[in-house]
Amino acid sequence: MLIILRQGDALKDAERVRAFLARSGLEASTVDLGDRLALSVVGVNGSPFPANVESLPEVERVVPVSRPPRLAAFRDDDPPRGVRIGDRAVGAGRFAIIAGPCAVEDEGLLLEAAAAARDYGADMLRGGAFKPRSSPYSFQGLGARAYEMLARAGQETGLPVVSEVMDQASLSAAVECIDLLQVGSRNMQNFNLLRLVGRSGKPVLLKRGMSATLEDLLLSAEYVLSEGNQSVILCERGIRTFSGHSRFTLDLSLIPALREVSHLPIVVDPSHAVGRREGVPPMARAAAAAGADGVMIEVHPDPARALSDGAQALRPEDLARLVPELRSLVAGAAPLRETGA
Ligand code: PEP
Ligand code: MN
């Protein structure tokens, strides 16, 4: 159980709630959520959890986290450190902007996108090599060749590169070239793949399945973490709802909900959620304001000619406008978590 305390005289409140729990034989440890404290009660061990804890004046609410995940959940002896990718970091106070085309289409276009990403202040370059397309007749990506192009673009610009892996074969090709391995929405519950990327030892960007709950997402992260790989970044990319005005519905409420139960950084992909270029900057700004640790945004030098997802791709000049807006939003935001990556 995680008992989230109201903002106030945090230490005294924590002591009072701890004393209350002690009367029921429960021990609690303190968790620093940055702007408030929480008390974590583990090993409830048959002692009934007092139902009236939630009505104590010091308590905002009680979040049940007694079931797994364990490694993806908060540990107060292990404060959030963020995830390092090369010389960049995501989380624990570092806001990362990942930009680049949906798919690597040819080396010239990729280098153009990479130069724009670097010049306009992005931290990492994205580009799909193996594309999980809904239709087998759509462009499927250039495959392993695209990983090599990404590695060269990364070397040229100094940006770490991010690309999706789909199976053992693509993973074997990616490990030499790719700095941050992406597991896509459609593979979030491909448990064999999760174990494999866990064993690769490389940082992993795990995208939320389009119908996955918060707990499903954390349990998938748990597969990677349980292989000894602590470098996991979660990514909200929109879920299926009844709405027809956007491709998916961007669930920004996931961010504060995750903060309460997990130390893992969370990045938001507004491009795949919204599906239309015009909607991407507002939702990227909303993600930054809601406390995301970064955004992943599709950018193409010539979206009208893109082989996939052109309608949602920003033009380089759109990225140039968006990056400073995001940086100033993050600088002005109240810290949700302790910093110090
Ligand atoms: C992508 O980021 O390239 C992608 C395919 O996204 P998702 O898995 O979220 O659909
Ligand atoms: Mn795409």
Image: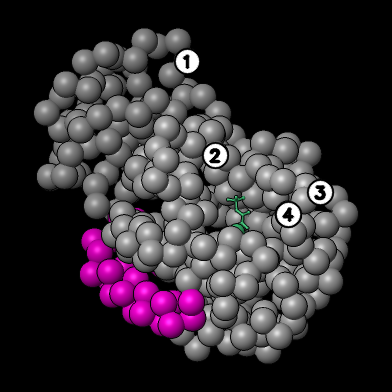
Q: Dot 1 surroundings within 10 Å: few (below 14), some, or many (20 or more)?
A: few
Q: Which dot marks residue 167?
A: 3
Task: Please tell me which residue is depicted at 58% across the width and 40% down the height of the picture.
Answer: 209
Distance from disc 2 to disc 1, alpha carbons, whole Å, reads: 35 Å
Query: For mark 2, does the 10 Å Cα neighbourhood hold few (<14), some (14 to 19), or many (20 or more) residues?
Result: some
Residue 155 in view (yes/no): no
Q: Is residue 286 left or right of residue 88?
A: left
Q: CA distance from mark 2 to mark 4?
A: 20 Å
Closer to the eye: label 2 or 4: 4
Measure how far apart labels 2 and 3 are at the Cα level.
19 Å
Left or right relative to 66: residue 288: left
- SS type, badge 3: loop
- Which one is in front in this view, the residue at disc 1 or the one at disc 4? 4
**N-terminal-most mark, 2 or 1:** 1
Q: Per the image, is 41 magenta? A: no
Q: Is 7 left or right of 333, judged from the image as shown?
A: left
- Secondary structure under the numbered disc 4 in the rendered image: loop
Mark 1 highlights which residue? 45
- Locate residue 119, reporting x and y percent: 50, 88
Choose mark 2 or mark 3, whichever is in front.
Answer: 2
What's the mark number on residue 138? 4
